[in-house]
Image (cartoon, grey):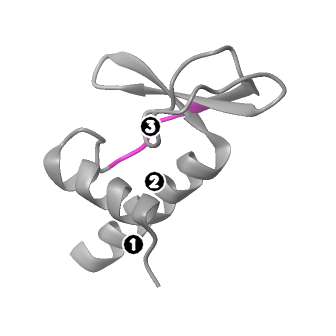
């Protein structure tokens, strides 16, 4: 079953807001940035995942990053 957040991730990938590949990431403690998926502030002590997206840094809650990563993997499987 697809959740609203899953649908948001898929829509952002399809529209090009989030890329179809993940090149690298850094995990740390939240620093107050807004999550690129759910737009909620990532506060300490929450985990923040930082990823370079289109020559800028995007930050994600760990769970939101996992949704993006899993959707990227699913799409890559479909394309092969």
- What residue span does the magenta drawing correspond to? 21-25
Residue 62 at what x, y percent from top left?
66, 44
Q: Which residue is mark 2?
A: 68
Label 1's element? Answer: helix
Of labels 2 and 3, the one closer to you: 2
Circles 2, 3 touching at the beta carbon (< 8 Å):
no
Q: Is residue 41 left or right of residue 13?
A: right
Residue 8 appears in view: yes
Q: Residue furthest right?
A: 45
Please tell me which residue is depicted at 44% across the width and 37% down the height of the picture: 23
Q: Label 2, label 1: how many angstroms apart (C-alpha)?
A: 10 Å
Vertical relation: 23 (above or below) 79: above
Viewer-side label of 1, 3: 1
Q: What residue is pinned by disc 1?
A: 74
**Where does label 3 land, which residue?**
23
Could you tell me how far apart the alpha carbons at marks 2 and 3 are, in whole angstroms? 13 Å
- Specify whether 61 is left or right of 3: right
Badge 3 local density, few (<14 within 10 Å), some, or many (20+)? few
Instruction: Name the residue rendered at 59%, 26% in the picture.
Output: 41
Q: Residue at x 34, y 55 (%)?
A: 8
60 sits left or right of 78 in the view: right
Q: Viewer-proximal residue, 35 or 16? A: 35
């Amino acid at each position: 079953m697809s959740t609203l957040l899953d649908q948001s991730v898929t829509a952002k990938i399809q529209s090009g807001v989030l890329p179809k590949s993940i090149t690298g990431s850094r995990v740390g403690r939240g620093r107050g940035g807004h999550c690129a998926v759910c737009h909620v502030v990532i506060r300490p002590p929450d985990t923040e995942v930082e990823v370079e997206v289109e020559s800028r840094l995007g930050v994600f809650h760990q769970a939101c990053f996992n949704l993006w990563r899993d959707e990227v993997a699913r799409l890559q499987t479909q394309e092969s």
